[in-house]
């Protein structure tokens, strides 16, 4: 734009000096035409400028790490008129790592329907917020520019890459009380005793013990069950270590979902120390959890999930599984 303005000023000065050596009317007309040329170019370009409608072209809003993301900014127009040039600044912020990437793009000879390809950094996991700033369009001569309202900010989830799930064997735990089958008495020695409640089967009453205690006592079966796995990790550290942790968490969660095993994922917010808990039962709940993982800030240092004991949220027993960094061995606490 500066080069074009300099060229125009030189042409205008040349037309002005020409009048010193020639007083003919043609020279005066030429000077007036050159003087009014920028105004005419702006008026001719106003329909194309005012009719420009930028929009995002996003084939996908979730991508794997290191994947090629083909986003673009499409410059639509209500009128079939070209523009001299379009320029804008793209700001990309990773909410998890805190990294911010800013670069400027310019396109000349912008025709209606042109898509400007964009580069998105996907070398680390995270929640990318993409924002277009300082969007400007030029007239046909490239001398004047007008600001244009950019499209609303959008986001991209850069998720983990598929890896082999770490080994995790869940121990069985005795002592889960299950009601006796309706109309049947518990069999075997694995049962518990409790007081009679309305609705209990008569066959489940322990008559000998009821006679001794002078009150009705009911037998209930004891069954073995697997505790709820709780995947825990520290949401802090360098981006490379977090990438490995998220990869391992995703792989282990997928293996548990394929085994129809509900589980939890927990981590502590590094700044406040608040424990974040998510129950994973299906793909939708995993996606909500992954979005939270990639959205939370991950500084290099902060609170650890192991600063306090990992306890059960309800009555079901739990089995904590520590997702460790790449240089550490995967061990169960």
Image (cartoon, rainbow, N blue to C red):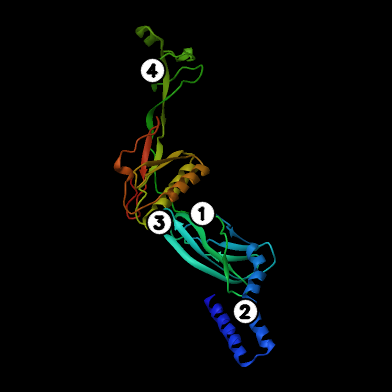
- Label 4 or label 1, whichever comes before in sequence order: 1
Q: Which residue is mark 1?
A: 155
Between 139 and 117, the one lying in front of the other is: 139
Q: Residues within 10 Å of mark 3 (few under 14, many from 20)?
A: some
Measured as percent of width and height from the top left, residue 239 is found at 38, 57
Q: Can see residue 82?
A: no
Is 57 located above or below residue 283 in the figure?
below
Q: Foreground residue, 284 or 296?
A: 296
Q: What is the spatial separation of the Cα atoms under label 2 and label 3, in whole angstroms?
A: 51 Å
Spatial CA distance of label 3 from label 4 is 57 Å
- Marking on residue 98: 3
> Residue 21, can we see it?
yes
Going 45% across and 57% down the picture, which residue do you hit?
A: 93
User: Which badge, 2 or 4, is on the more N-terminal residue?
Assistant: 2
Which residue lies under the disc numbered 2?
A: 35
x, y (%) of residue 268? 36, 44
Of residues 92 and 160, the one drawn nearer to the viewer in this rendering: 92
């Amino acid at each position: 734009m500066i080069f074009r303005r300099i060229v125009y000023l030189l042409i205008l000065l040349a037309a002005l000096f020409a009048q010193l050596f020639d007083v003919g009317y043609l020279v005066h007309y030429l000077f007036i035409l050159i003087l009014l040329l920028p105004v005419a170019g702006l008026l001719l370009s106003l329909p194309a400028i005012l009719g420009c409608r930028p929009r995002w072209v996003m084939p996908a809003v979730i991508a794997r790490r290191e994947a090629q993301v083909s986003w673009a900014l499409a410059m639509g127009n209500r009128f079939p008129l070209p523009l001299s040039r379009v320029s804008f600044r793209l700001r990309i912020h990773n909410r998890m790592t805190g990294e911010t990437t800013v670069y400027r793009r310019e396109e000349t000879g912008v025709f209606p329907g042109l898509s400007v390809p964009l580069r998105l950094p996907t070398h680390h996991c995270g929640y990318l917020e993409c924002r277009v700033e300082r969007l400007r369009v030029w007239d046909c001569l490239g001398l004047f520019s007008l600001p244009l309202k950019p499209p609303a900010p959008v986001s991209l989830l850069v998720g983990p890459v598929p890896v082999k799930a770490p080994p995790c064997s869940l121990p069985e735990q005795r002592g889960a009380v299950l009601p006796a089958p309706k109309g049947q008495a518990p069999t075997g020695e694995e049962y518990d005793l409790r007081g009679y409640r309305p609705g209990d089967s008569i066959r489940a009453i322990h008559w000998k013990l009821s006679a001794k205690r002078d009150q009705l006592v009911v037998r209930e079966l004891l069954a073995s069950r697997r505790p709820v796995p709780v995947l825990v990790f520290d949401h802090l550290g360098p981006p490379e270590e977090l990438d490995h942790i998220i990869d391992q968490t995703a792989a282990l969660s997928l293996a548990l979902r394929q085994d129809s095993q509900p589980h939890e994922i927990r981590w502590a917010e590094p700044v406040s120390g608040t424990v974040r808990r998510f129950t994973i039962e299906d793909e939708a709940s995993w996606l909500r959890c992954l979005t939270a993982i990639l959205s939370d800030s991950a500084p290099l240092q902060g609170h650890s999930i192991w600063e306090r004991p990992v306890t059960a949220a309800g009555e079901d027993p739990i089995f904590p599984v520590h997702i460790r960094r790449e240089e550490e061995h995967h061990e169960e606490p």
